[in-house]
Amino acid sequence: MTACLFFGIFHKALRQLFLFMRYLLIAQAVIALLLVVSILLQNRGSGLGSAFGSDFGGYYTKRGIEKFLFYATVVLAIVFLALSATNVYFASGMGV
């Protein structure tokens, strides 16, 4: 009776862990997609034009949406790294 109760509780906890890992993977995929979009939306001035001689020649400060995209990219990268580390931690069996 005691062993059956123990395995029932263990099974329920393991099922909750797998459900948590599934949500973790979904969150990681969404953050990865948002990270790609935020990187692609950033404007890098002349792009490859500086390789062919059309250099901007000066520095400018980020303002408005460009500043928001920069900080959003940094935050999304940190969140993605944290989700990846958490996913590796639980997948390696250390979180069990």
Image (spheres, rainbow, N blue to C red):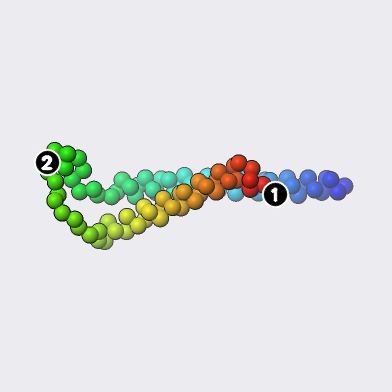
Residue 60 shown left or right of residue 2 in the figure: left
The residue singled out by tag 1 in the image is 13
Q: Which residue lies furthest to the top in this view?
A: 52
Disc 1 crowd, CA 10 A, few/some/many (<14, 14-19, 20+): few
How would you rate the neighbour count of disc 2 (Cα within 10 Å): few for under 14, some for 14-19, many for 20 or more?
few
At label 2, which amino acid type do we have? Gly
Q: Residue at x 16, y 41 (%)?
A: 49
Q: In the rendering, which numbered label is found on residue 35?
A: none
Q: Is residue 40 left or right of residue 9?
A: left
Sequence-first disc among 2 and 1: 1
Left or right: residue 49 compared with residue 1: left
Q: Which element is circle 2 on? A: loop
Callout 1 secondary element: helix
Residue bearing the label numbered 2: 53
Q: Residue furthest bottom?
A: 64
Residue 70 in the image, given as x and y percentages of width and height: 32, 55
Amino acid beneath label 1: Ala
Label 2–label 1 contact, CB within 8 A: no
Q: Is residue 1 left or right of residue 68?
A: right
Q: Which of marks 2 and 1 is in front?
A: 2
Q: Which residue is drawn at 46% across and 53% down?
A: 79
Q: Where is residue 62 in the image (x, y as percent from the top left)?
A: 25, 59
Q: Determine the residue located farthest toward the right in the rendered image.
A: 1
Is residue 65 among what the camera can see?
Answer: no
The answer to whether residue 87 shows anywhere in this view is yes
* Coordinates of residue 14 in the picture (x, y in percent): 68, 46
Residue 25 versus residue 67 in the image, above or below: above
Q: Residue at x 46, y 48 (%)?
A: 81
The quadrant in which residue 51 appears is top left
Tell me the distance, in whole angstroms, between the alpha carbons under discs 2 and 1: 62 Å
Residue that appears at 20% across and 57% down: 60
